[in-house]
Amino acid sequence: MGNLIYTGKVGFGLQNGTRWGFPTANISDVTPRFTLENGVYAVHVIINGKRWNAMMYIGTRPTLKLTKPTVEIHIFDFAQNIYDQSIQFHVLQKIRDEQTFNSIDSLVGQLKKDEEITRSFFRSKHI
């Protein structure tokens, strides 16, 4: 998806991801400006010089009936407090388009599928 490295600041969100088992780093002030379509992506995140595999969501969270665009990154196997830190990330592969779900259970079920697809992507690419 190109060689662009994005930078953004981690802030507080609504904490829905944490409640659903998918804590996310809510990213603001992303530079350079996104030209990506809404959806879910496989990304590498760089925090304090270490690279982590992750999945990123870009969109408006239509299932929650929200309209403000957001960038959220679920970092795999990660449990550090990174609020107010700047992080870098590199977008590798689009996993799926943004969708609207009939229920939170359906959304969480899809997040589990997204995670497996994204982890499989990293395993297959050995990255």
Image (spheres, grey):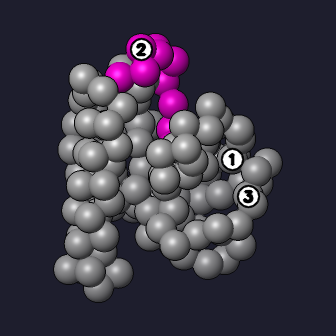
Tag 2 or tag 1, which sits nearer the N-term?
A: 1
Q: Nearer the viewer, residue 31 or 16?
A: 16
Q: Which residue is mark 2?
A: 65
Mark 1, residue position: 10
Q: Is residue 124 above or below residue 37?
A: below
Name which residue lies at 43% across and 21% down: 64
For image coordinates 22% across by 62% down, the residue present is 117
Q: Position of residue 86 (x, y in %)?
A: 72, 54
Q: Residue at x 51, y 62 (%)?
A: 75
Q: Is residue 67 in sight in this rendering?
A: yes
* Helix, strand or loop status at disc 2: loop
Circles 3 and 1: CB distance less than 8 Å? yes
Mark 3 → mark 1, Cα distance in angstroms? 7 Å
Q: Where the N terminus falls, by quadrant?
A: bottom left
Q: Is residue 76 left or right of residue 40?
A: right
Left or right, 110 with respect to 79, comes to left
**How crowded is the residue under tag 2: few (<14 C-alpha within 10 Å), some, or many (20+)?**
few
C-alpha distance separating marks 2 and 3: 27 Å
Q: Is residue 94 visible?
A: no
Callout 2 amino acid = Lys
Mark 2 and mark 3 residues within 8 Å of each other at the beta carbon: no
- Which amino acid type is marked by label 1? Val
Q: Earlier in the sequence, mark 2 or mark 3?
A: 2
CA gap, disc 1 and disc 2: 23 Å
Mark seen at residue 42: none
- Residue 82 is labelled as 3
Q: Which residues are magenta?
A: 63-73
